[in-house]
Image (cartoon, rainbow, N blue to C red):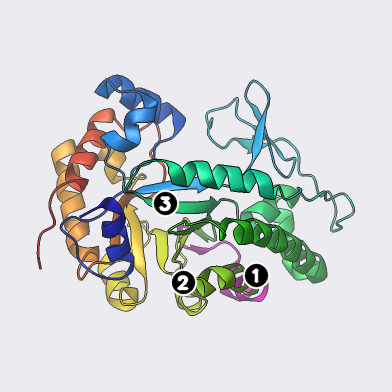
Amino acid sequence: MTRRERVKNAIEHRESDRCPHNVELTGEAMKNFCAFAGIKKEDFPLFAENHIDKLSFNGGSETAPGYFQDEFSVIWNRTGIDKDIGVIEKYLLEDAGLSSLVMPELNAEEIGEKSRAFLAKPSDAFKLAKIGMLLFERAWSLRGMERLLIDMYEEEAFVETLFEKITDYNLGIINEALKYDFDGFYFGDDYGQQQGMIMGPLLWRKFIKPCLAKTFEPIKKKGLPIMLHSCGNIEQILPDLIEIGLDVYQTVQPEVYDLQKLKKTYGSSLSFYGAVSTQKALVFAKPEELKTIIKKTKETLNIKGGYICAPTHQVQADVKPENIQAMIEAFSEPLIKF
């Protein structure tokens, strides 16, 4: 059975010979692990037997050592402890107006070149088109999270227009990518925190849900699956996400969810991706203990399929290489039949 077939089975709630899995590391964690394992960075996906490969359509470039400018002209300072994402130097939208907003130009030729090169790579992995910072994250990166949340109460028209512009830009990318034979789409947009949602379900339904539905629509029309990453506890809106066509929810943090309840309540409609804690288990468990945790997680979430084993986020440098090795070994074990 190919890796692509295993992922497809997980999405369609069918069992496979093995549970599909995927492991991603931050830059520092990757450096540490490659030194430990004696491998090159470019060889890690094959070493880990990753089942998923993603092509990101987010753009940008380094403007100075430690500074990254994204496609919306936001400058990210990566000179501190966070060298993968960084912190924003200055929010570009200083007031609730759009006169200073310069939308990126859609480059269809570049999207085509990247897509063809990515899909031509010899691999049996499940290949996803990806847009990170899809909507809410993109908006607060421009305006600032606190101000954007206040705007949802005081400047509704501004928020709606900003979200519409971002959505239209994303749809331009999606419609170009749909011309190529991707296996599905993956989006990143954090709505949750440890004890609930950042903006609450009412504001999410008012401002974000309509834009997500519009974003998902052409993908669902083509019959392709959609994966959405959101950190935190977003259980309040899982029925909404199912309603508008979400197939796979990632990251599924075991610190904030009862995994058995989650599987029982939503497992017939959603597949789950993640659930191995980068916050606790990967950091603090010993290798053999970690393997036991992963085995139990599989037993809980992989009943009748519907689960892609993965850490809840990119693994950070506070995780020992020994634990990353143990995780990969546990992920690769044959499926226990239920």
Q: Is residue 74 magenta?
A: no
Looking at the image, can residue 145 be seen? no
Which residue is drawn at the image coordinates 23% and 30% (left, top)? 322
Q: Amino acid at mark 1?
A: Cys
Relative image position of residue 231 (x, y in whole percent): 47, 55
Is residue 330 depicted above or below 42 in this figure? below
Q: Residues within 10 Å of mark 2 (few under 14, many from 20)?
A: few
Q: Nearer the viewer, mark 3 or mark 1?
A: 3
* Label 1 sits on residue: 211
Secondary element type, mark 3: strand
* Label 3 sits on residue: 127
Q: Which residues are magenta?
A: 193-209
Q: How far apart are the alpha carbons under marks 3 and 1?
A: 24 Å
Which residue is drawn at the image coordinates 59% and 43% (left, top)? 113
Q: How far apart are the alpha carbons under marks 1 and 2?
A: 19 Å
Is residue 83 depicted above or below 189 in this figure? above
The quarter of the picture where the N terminus appears is bottom left
Residue 310 as seen in the image, left or right of residue 60? left
Residue occupying the far right of the picture: 99
* Label 2 sits on residue: 223
Which quadrant of the structure image shows residue 33?
top left
